[in-house]
């Protein structure tokens, strides 16, 4: 007699679940900024700049990259490329969120390091890094279709924190099966990157860290 066990991903609460996000969304980047300006968000590093809808990635995907996002000058430079007035509200919102997310990332790092008994040496173990913020938008496919918003992949950075903004399309591969991950409005998903998993041999729920985005017609873009 077989028993099916539902897989549950570990959740750690750092704040009240009813805490509201402090932004009205940066999706307007995709709707109001001309393509000519979007193309100025360029980088020699793949996916660190603007990526428009294309067959190589996905026809439903568009994304921007903002390096060193906890540095206000970096955010300001990005905004000046996109908007003539520099959009101060955007700068303040993104800089505040990027700074807080960076602190959250460091806290999770400390928890991981402490679990290996290295808590007292965490300052020497921690990596000095600059955060990359990616703004990603997914368009809805034709009625009745479920299409890949972003192909299955692992992340090349040490770690990634995903805020899905109620898109509800994130899926994680576990034991060869794709599990849909539904996050609450105040939740973030911490993804172990390839370097971290390799270097400390981290194993979580036998997850190989492959994840993807699946979008259906009901998706609100």
Image (spheres, rainbow, N blue to C red):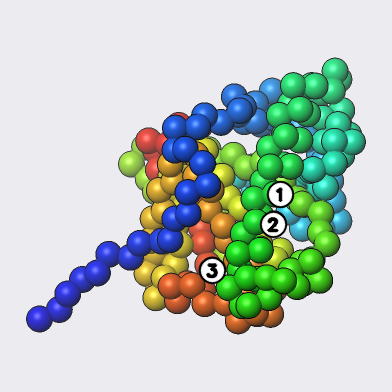
Vertical relation: 173 (above or below) 23: below
Give the camera-side residue of 146 and 8: 8
Residue drawn at the location 71% of the way across and 29% of the way down: 93
Residue 64 image offset from top left, x and y in percent: 72, 42
In this picture, residue 6 sits left or right of residue 55: left
The kind of secondary structure element at disc 3 is strand
Which residue is disc 1 drawn over? 102
Q: For mark 2, what is the residue? A: 106
Label 1 close to label 2 by CB (< 8 Å): yes
Dot placed on the residue nearer the N-terminal end, 1 or 3: 1
Q: Nearer the viewer, residue 72 or 215?
A: 72
Reading the image, the residue beneath label 3 is: 209
Residue name at image x 49 percent, y 45 percent: 187
Q: Is residue 180 visible?
A: yes
> Residue at image x 43%, y 73%?
205
Report helix, strand or loop for mark 2: helix
Image location of residue 109, percent across then percent down: 66, 63
């Amino acid at each position: 007699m077989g028993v099916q066990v539902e897989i549950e991903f570990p959740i750690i609460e750092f704040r009240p679940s009813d805490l509201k996000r402090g932004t009205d969304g940066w999706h307007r980047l995709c709707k109001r900024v001309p393509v000519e300006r979007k193309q100025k968000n360029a980088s020699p590093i793949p996916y660190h700049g603007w990526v428009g809808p294309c067959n190589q990635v996905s026809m439903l995907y568009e994304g921007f990259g903002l390096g060193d996002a906890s540095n206000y000058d970096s955010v300001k430079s990005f905004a000046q490329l996109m908007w003539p007035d520099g959009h101060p509200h955007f700068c303040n919102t993104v800089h505040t969120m990027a700074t807080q997310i960076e602190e959250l990332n460091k806290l999770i790092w400390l928890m991981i390091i402490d679990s290996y008994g290295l808590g007292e040496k965490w300052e020497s173990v921690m990596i000095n890094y600059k955060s990359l913020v990616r703004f990603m938008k997914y368009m809805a496919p034709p009625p009745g279709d479920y299409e890949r918003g972003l192909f299955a992949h692992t992340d090349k950075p040490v770690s990634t924190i995903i805020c899905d903004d109620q898109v509800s399309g994130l899926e994680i591969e576990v034991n060869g099966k794709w599990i849909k991950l539904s996050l609450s409005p105040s939740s973030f998903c911490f993804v172990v990157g390839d370097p971290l998993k390799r270097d400390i041999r981290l194993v979580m729920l036998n997850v190989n860290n492959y994840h993807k985005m699946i979008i259906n017609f009901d998706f609100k873009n």
